[in-house]
Image: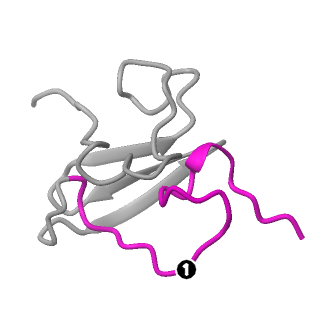
Amino acid sequence: MDRSIPDGSAGDGAFTDSDGAQADGPDGSSTAHVRTIASGTMFTCALFDNGKVTCWGDSSLGQLGLGDPNAQGGNTGEMGDPLGYVDLGTK
């Protein structure tokens, strides 16, 4: 069975399924924990308990909300601090 994951959608730099991925915030903070995960076609987003959102995977149509079409999280070193949070604006 092919368990490949396109465009780094797993977020761990690998292109195959893996277990035990950590889910701290992009700033490496252990105080922000994932509350909800949502995924679409070839991308995934996480809502943290601090109200911030981060997304990774394919962004060819801007679906990551980062303002560009560049895929995120497919290579080593792209998760954590380099990923950052999606700018959701202000209230």
Q: Which residue is mark 1?
A: 19
Residue most extreme to the front: 76
In this rendering, would 29 be left or right of 47? left
Q: Could you tell me the amino acid type at mark 1?
A: Asp
Q: Position of residue 65 (x, y in %)?
A: 38, 28
11 lies above or below 83? below
Whether 24 is among the magenta residues is yes
6 lies above or below 88? below
* Count of marks, rendered view: 1
Q: For the N terminus, which image quadrant?
A: bottom right
Q: Position of residue 38 (x, y in %)?
A: 49, 54
Residue at 14% from the left image edge and 64% from the top image edge: 29
Residue most extreme to the bottom: 20
Q: Of helix, strand and loop, which one carries label 1?
A: loop
Image quadrant in which you'd find residue 10: bottom right
Q: For the C terminus, which image quadrant?
A: top left
Residue at 62% from the left image edge and 43% from the top image edge: 7
Whether 5 is among the magenta residues is yes
Q: Which residues are magenta?
A: 1-26
Q: Position of residue 84 (x, y in %)?
A: 25, 42
Return the residue nearer the eye: 17 or 64.
17
In this rendering, would 14 be left or right of 11? right
